[in-house]
Image: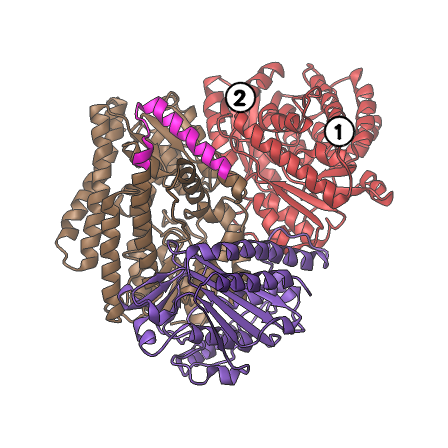
Amino acid sequence: MGMDKKPLKDRALERYKKERDWFAFLLQAVDMMVTPEMKLQAKLLRILLDSKQAVVDCVEQEKPFIAGYFCSAPEIFNAMNLPWFMLMETPFLAASAPYILEDIQGAEDMGLGTDLCTAIRLPIYYIESGMMPVPTAVIGLLSPCDGTTMLNQVLQHNKAWRDVPLFCADPPYTSDERATQYYAVELRRMVSFLEQHTGRTLDMSRLREVCEESNRTYKLWQEYNELRRAVPSPHGWEIGGAQAFAISQCFVAGDPRCTDWFRQLVECGEIRVREGRGANDRVKEKIRLLWFDIMPYGWIYEFMPWLEEEWGAVIVMDMFSNFPYTLIDTSSEESIFLGLARRNLMEVPMIRQARGTAENFSSDIVRLVKDYKIDCVIWPGHMGHKDGSATAGIMRETCRKLGVPFLHIGLDLFDKRYTSVDEVKDRVSQFFTGMGLG
Amino acid sequence: MATFDGQIAAVAAHLEDLRARGRSTRAFAAPSSVTALGEGLPIRVGSGATANVILRTDTFVELGSPDAGSCAFVLWTDTPSLVRDGRITLVGPDIPEVPGGSLPFGQVLTVGGVDLGAEDHQSVEQAQFVADQVEGYMVRSSSRNVWSRVSKDAAARGFCFETLGRALMLLCKSSLPEVQAVEVAFVTSGREDLLRLEDVAREVHERGSELVKAHWKAKGFDLDCDFDCRSCEEKKVCDYIRDVAGVRKKTRKAAAGRPVQGRRQARH
Amino acid sequence: MDTEGRAKAFEEFAGAAGAIMNPAVAAWKAQGGRVVGYFCSHVPTEVLTAAGLLPFRMRGTGSTGTELADAFFSNINCSFVRNTFNLALQGDYDFLDGLVCVSSCDHVRRVYDNWKRNLGTPFLRIISLPKKVEDAQVGWYRDEVAILREAVEKHFEVTISDERLREAIRLHNRTRRLQRELYELRKKEAPPLTGAETLAVMVAGTAMPRQHYNEALEALLERLRGANGQRDYRARLMIVGGELDDPRYLEVIEEQGGLVVTDAVCFGSKAMWNLVDEEASDPSEALARYYIQGQPSCPRMHGDQPRRAAFLMDMVRDFRVDGVVGERMMFCDLWCVEHYMNDLDLKEAGVPFIRLDREYNASAKGQLRTRIQAFLETMGK
């Protein structure tokens, strides 16, 4: 690659800036749209851009910043005033990355198995190719899956990243009080690690403020999710679902901008519920769908609009929009850490279902189907979700007991070559037809 | 089976204690039969009774929010005489008395039936989660406890705790034929008055988990989870996909028409 | 040792490795003994031995398909897990009185969830295995070992005193020492046993009463110590990977002239290279320390890759390995990435390395032969 001769710092930033610029371009387009939902999208994009720019500034000005995850208590990062980015950011924002297929090919050429989750292969590829900004420190992740565990080890193995301090909180497999206590101690160790390696200190009163703001955000999120129980659901895949998760966990955890965004989201939703308007103003809601995984970010625009337009199938709820959270008790330092431990170990999506035993795969489906009047459940069967696919039988039985049709597809959420979009559409169409839906 | 007889007595004692300490305590007598329970209610009860969500601005009162406090559980016994069938007890303010308010909410359903046993525990427990079956009353999705809203419309029509109590009794008796007697208690007098109920709730939850484990242990299975597919009546693999679709269609048609009382809840 | 004598020496081990039920287990059960299956190298099997139980490591040996298991798993789940679970659904594991799993990999840990819902094994446990190897995790695992101990005592109505646990540790360590001695013989220019034979012996060690196995292994070592070894090979190979319990896989490799002189696989050296501290005052803590920090770890253990890499290099050096074969079960993310790193390390060290993906049932023998032949030729052997 022509980038090879540039210093690592510049090379790494080049791709990151490209992504930032793409979103800046997208924002220009979205800014011209006038609906309340589009204004919310614009706000979200601005927040995303701010967080990306913060990372760029830190690299260029040699200020501390970290790589972290949504399930590593980002409230703490915010409280310590540490800009951060997610190692797996690009695949999750894949819809905006036109080079994604090229990168996947690059990962394959590098010798990473094609059966390894694409969301893991890509960051490994970026790290090994020097296309990721090297942070001051890394907060790695050891759940929910084998892939994330191995990603951290590649970091430690890579010569350019070997000396970057890395901490991973150890996730217990159980979900009881003992596990929460243990994880709370791990989070405290994470704080000590960050203080040692970034020079920032954690002020508990600031953390309390952030958690209280987070609670305000979450209360609104909870209110919003009630709105999606309405028939028809006021919103579908485009707004309010996965974006709610992204803004509250990935970009600005415990930030007033986040609370403000949710306030407007709730207002938008309430108006639509009152007016009896569904997610799609052109097409009537016919099928209420639970998409029980991440959105197919690699081909979302080719598939999601089709679901609504072709079938009137609205994604009323998905794994990342689900709200199983308890508010953080901010009465003491101990209760704050316990609350953060509980949230990040047992409540955040994917970790909640996949980290421990399979109960949450089934209990979440039961609650969501009942509360959201779900007509059918789709488990996309992402190629990287090995444990989830080993739970497909359990999910299927759960749905059978509920009398709700269940579809397991088998695809790659990020690489449309794995199962083509047409094939997915075909499978879904057959499913809807066979089940007498729509 | 005297599984929860101790807890039944404990709840009764607690309510008496609250009364003795001067809390406003009211008792209502509801009829016993399912038909009579449904007569004269200001709102509809049954599957699909609540067509939609209750918005914040349409909320007359909120019950059991995390800030206010909530505690809800179900007790059962195979000695129906321990249960004062039709009795609804309210400790604290009633719904019409606190417009715009947010009340702490304790709800205890006590059910009795000579044929009730350990195998019924999960079904009985589900009886308190009424989903969309009480018009003008919405139980929120995301809480483990009962956190609910009463709409302004329902309140204007006279919705109160007596209404809610009768609705719960009606739903319980119509979905669980083994139930012969139902008593409901509501506590809205203060968060501190829920603390004793929370202790009982913990005991009930632990005992409930043990019951389920013991039930399956007797069959030779060692569980550490009380969710077991083998308890499902519909476990047979359905080879006929259209049959499933047909059932689904019929169910939805029925739900779209007049509310149907007495529909059996799915056992989970 | 002549061919017939050789076959006889290995007969019991090969028999135990080649089937699920073997005469030693059958005799154990006939005498009223109880058997508890387990998945994964990190299960503290000493606890089971101390309870008077026979720990039996789970395999899919003899499975001819996964039709039953496929209703619960999917085609992106590891074939080891599917084949093993298939055997269980068929009833081949009905002799188990219990099953202990750890939260090992994404595939194996879901065996627990599916087993719980579909099979009636009376005692079923999953232990929370940490993902790091620091002292805090030893502390957590010590508590998990203690919890397991209590659960075993309660269910099987036995008492596991500290002394009984120490006794079990000593017994298991004896096994480890004997197995280590077996491996030491393979350092010779002419090793007296093949890799396939070694694997059979190692697998048998997970499928027999411990005392009986130790005696049999002592007898085997007696015969092998002075035996003539094998000189007729093209290269000395090491096999690295995870789940490998089928000696026939190594037979195919060795038929091409690549003698497998050592390994770092779950049923192999990783199970026995180090010892549990027999002198520790708290045997539960000693076990926790061994299973977290002591034994060569699984790739799922974060932060331990440098130690695993060092172990690999030490093996290459000590056994004078000419080339390394990295085997991986399809859909295993752990070994996918671990081999990626192994490849880089071995390349840097100038050690030839080949990566082989496989399914549990060694069906693609032709392909395997071809690749090994090519590998040997590229090594100039």
> On screen, C56 above or below C282?
below
Q: Position of residue A258 (x, y in %)?
A: 26, 47
Which residues are drawn in magenta? A181-207
Amino acid at the residue labelled 1: Ala
Give the chain letter for red. C
| Residue visible at 37% across and 59% down in the picture | A317
Picture quadrant where residue A37 is located: bottom left
Q: Secondary structure at mark 1?
A: helix
Which quadrant is the N terminus of chain C positioned in? top right
**Which quadrant of the structure image shows residue A307?**
bottom left
Q: Residue B89 location in percent, x, y?
A: 49, 70
Residue at image position (52%, 57%) is B197
Indicate the colouring scheme: by chain
Residue B235 relative to residue A38: left or right: right
Instruction: Name the subunit of mark 1.
Output: C
Is there any visible trace of residue B50 in the rendered image?
A: yes
Q: Which residue is mark 1?
A: C168
Question: Which is more N-terminal, label 1 or label 2?
Answer: 1
- As displayed, is residue C238 above or below residue A75? above
Q: Quadrant of the C terminus of chain C?
A: top right
Asked whether residue A407 appears in the rendered view, the answer is: no
Task: Say which chain is purple.
Answer: B
Left or right: where does residue A236 sit relative to residue B81? Answer: left
Q: Residue sitting at 42 percent across and 85 percent down?
A: B40
Q: Which chain is brown?
A: A
Q: Which mark is residue C307?
A: 2
State the image coordinates of residue C209 (x, y, percent, origin top left).
79, 35
Alpha carbon separation for disc pair 2 and 1: 27 Å
Q: Is residue C366 above or below residue C326?
A: below
Q: Nearer the viewer, residue C101 or A274?
A: A274
Q: Residue furthest right?
A: C31
- A373 relative position to C327: left or right: left
